[in-house]
Amino acid sequence: MNTKRGFTLIETTIATFILTVGILGVFALVQMITVFTSSISSQLRAVYLAQEGVENIRNIRDSNWLALAVWDQGIASSGWESIDKFQRQITIQKPQPDKMIVLVEVKWSKAGEPSQVTAETELYDWK
């Protein structure tokens, strides 16, 4: 009687298949995480660029106040400017003499599809 027992070819094939499916699943998950991380990173950077545009206009207004100049001197809408893979445009509206609406749009392409972030604020002449 033969008491040696080992793996048969079928058992080895099934184990190899299960191991391969598991490894491929892990690789797919890692790839998906990489794509999501890149997408979130781009969106976060776009939000920072939009906020920076608003802060630039606010800084000009505050500098004008400190210099005792007209509060909206040197503030105007800008065309699209390129910052790496992003495009930013600042639009200024003056519905009243003492009020300014600042709208900053940031656009970029994410996986071939256009994406956009917008920031808007109101600035006033408090003097």
Image (spheres, rainbow, N blue to C red):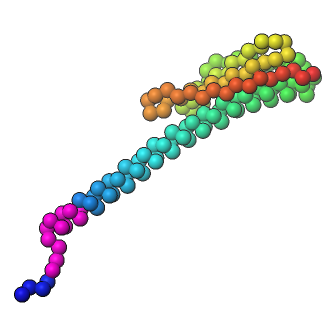
Seen as rendered, the residue at the extreme front is: 1
Q: Is residue 8 magenta?
A: yes
| Percent coordinates x, y for residue 112 in the rendering | 44, 29
Above or below, 104 relative to 37: above
Specify the quadrant that holds the N terminus. bottom left
Residue in view at x 46 percent, y 48 percent: 33
Along the line of sight, the residue nearer the viewer: 83 or 88: 88
- Left or right, 56 with reference to 14: right
Residue in view at x 42 percent, y 51 percent: 30
- Left or right, 39 with reference to 30: right
- Chief secondary structure of the magenta portion: helix
- Left or right, 46 with reference to 124: left
Above or below, 111 relative to 120: below
The answer to which image quadrant residue 77 occupies is: top right
Give, as a single range, the part of the protein colored magenta: 5-16
Seen as rendered, the residue at the extreme left is: 1
